[in-house]
Image (tube, rainbow, N blue to C red):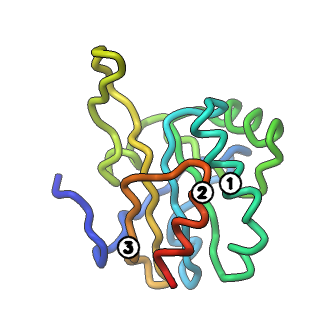
Amino acid sequence: MEELKEGDPAPGFVANDQNGNQVSLSDFRGKDVILYFYPKDDTPGCTAESCDFRDNYQFLSSQGFEVIGVSIDDEKSHQKFISKYQLPFTLLADTDKKIVSDYGVWGEKNLYGKKYMGTFRKTFVIDKEGNIRKIIDKVDTKNSSQQVLDLIK
């Protein structure tokens, strides 16, 4: 699959949120979307990233953004993560790895010389028409929301 670029149409998706409700990208047509991919609920980097979006959620919302997190964790894991850190936005359970594959964020990773398949941390800013406006490849987990705001100024 060809790597997604800024200006490309964002791949559509349908997945369950933390409550088992079906969510699709088309539900957010007319809004700007911050779609962030992270490896695993309740791990240090993923928690820092999610809590940064939480801490800046009101401001992001006031600027017209919807925040959506995606990992391959299941709904129950997402519920615990949201409850533990009071996350005010949707987390999608991509247990079949369709969204991570469509967005090119699933692949071989290397940790201490051990190779394994996993989710790459990446953020996509999708415009009101459903096109990719910005892609953040090198996510600063403690300042992820500011990275988005800096790019779209």
Q: Residues within 10 Å of mark 2 (few under 14, many from 20)?
A: some
Asked whether the beta carbons under mark 2 and mark 1 sit within 8 Å of each other, the answer is: yes
Horizontal side of 107 relative to 68 (left or right) equals: left
Q: Which amino acid does label 2 sit on?
A: Asn
Which of pointers 3 and 2 indicates the residue nearer the eye? 2
Name the one closer to the observer, 38 or 152: 152
- In the picture, residue 53 is in which quadrant? bottom right
Which of pointers 3 and 1 indicates the residue nearer the eye? 1
Which of pointers 2 and 1 indicates the residue nearer the eye? 2
Report the Cα–Cα distance between label 2 and label 1: 6 Å
Horizontal side of 86 relative to 116 (left or right) equals: right
Q: Position of residue 136 (x, y in %)?
A: 40, 61
The secondary structure type at the circle numbered 1 is: helix
Task: Tell which circle, 2 or 1, labels the residue nearer the N-terminal end.
Answer: 1
Residue at point 46%, 75% (across, down):
151
| 64 over 40 or under it: above or below | below
Task: Tell which circle, 3 or 2, labels the residue nearer the N-terminal end.
Answer: 3
Q: Name the residue under label 3.
A: 132
Name the one closer to the observer, 91 or 15: 91
Q: Which amino acid does label 3 sit on?
A: Ile
Residue at point 74%, 81% (across, down):
62
Horizontal side of 96 relative to 141 (left or right) equals: left
Q: Name the residue under label 2.
A: 143
Q: Mark 1 points at which residue?
A: 52
Q: Where is residue 97 in the image (x, y as percent from the top left)?
A: 40, 38
Task: Tell which circle, 3 or 1, labels the residue nearer the N-terminal end.
Answer: 1
